[in-house]
Amino acid sequence: MTTLTNETAAIAVQDIKKSFGKNEAKTDVLQGVSFQIPKGEFVSLMGASGSGKSTLLYLIGGLDRNYTGDIYINGSNISKMKERDMTRLRLDTVGFVFQFYNLVQNLSVEDNIMLPIVMSKKKNTAEYRKKLDEILEITGLTAKRKSKPGQLSGGQQQRVAIARAVLANPEIILADEPTGNLDQKAGNEIMELFRRVNKEKGITILMVTHSPQSAAYADRVIVLENGKMKEETRTEQAV
Ligand SMILES: Nc1ncnc2c1ncn2[C@@H]1O[C@H](COP(=O)(O)OP(=O)(O)OP(=O)(O)O)[C@@H](O)[C@H]1O
Ligand SMILES: [Mg+2]
């Protein structure tokens, strides 16, 4: 077996430190976090509210570049990358499911789901349109495909964000509490979908969750506590 390095991992973070605010108001949210995620692994990121999970996901996605340490995506050190190259990498490689779904309010459900594909000029739009029906069906959104996000429930909006991330078939999915607003049945369906794209397409997944039940779908659990990584648990693939 070849040893995993920052260059061969799908995601690697090396001694990441991140603070918010200044002087008395300064909060050291991440105080030297390091881990590597090999290609094709499904990892859950857990930890108390305020422990820095979303912050870390933003850094890995290149959405906040104000930190120290190094972050590698598919072997490229994004900490040193130009903004333009970073944006390109993000569009081509990474699918996001945010804690707040970032849907475009004046676009329909299906246009929201297609948006990253339309924006990534490398992808053949017609080809993905054929897969749209299937992803709408899996996420239970077929009847809502023409609706605007404002006409949907929180859980339905969440499913639009998940469908958008999965359809684009990215190499990496970063998901922030993707089942946070869903009942257990809908949550399990989303986890089944994640596990399916992880196993069938080899998509690497880093998923923040508070739900032990969702976390159990992953191969490994990373826990953040007091700005550091507390433990790594291998989950039994029992679910
Ligand atoms: N833009 C910001 N300005 C100042 N402080 C911030 C900012 N964003 C986050 N923080 C602080 O950083 C800490 C970590 O926040 P973060 O959102 O990463 O937590 P989290 O682990 O995702 O929590 P939750 O489980 O509640 O989503 C918190 O103390 C928060 O108040
Ligand atoms: Mg969060």
Image (tube, rainbow, N blue to C red):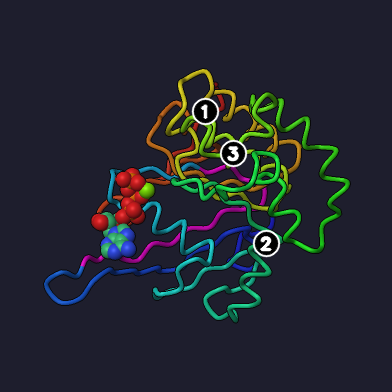
Q: State whether residue 153 appears in this view.
A: yes
- Disc 3 residue type? Lys
- Range covered by the magenta-colored residues: 27-43
Q: Does mark 3's beta carbon lie closer than 8 Å to ligand 2? A: no
How far, Cα to Cα, is label 1 from label 2?
33 Å
Mark 1 is surrounded, within 10 Å at the Cα level, by few (under 14), some (14 to 19) or many (20 or more) other residues, namely few
31 relative to 236 in the view: left or right: left
Q: Is residue 36 magenta?
A: yes
Q: Does mark 1's beta carbon lie closer than 8 Å to ligand 1? A: no
- Disc 2 residue type? Leu
Answer with the quarter of the image where residue 123 lies.
bottom right
How far, Cα to Cα, is label 3 from label 1?
40 Å
Q: Which residue is mark 1?
A: 236
Between 130 and 223, the one lying in front of the other is 130
Q: Position of residue 235 (x, y in %)?
A: 49, 33
Q: Position of residue 85 (x, y in %)?
A: 66, 76
Q: Which residue is mark 2?
A: 91
218 relative to 64 in the view: left or right: right
Mark 3 against mark 1, which lies toward the viewer? 3
Between 36 and 46, the one lying in front of the other is 46
Mark 2 against mark 3, which lies toward the viewer? 3
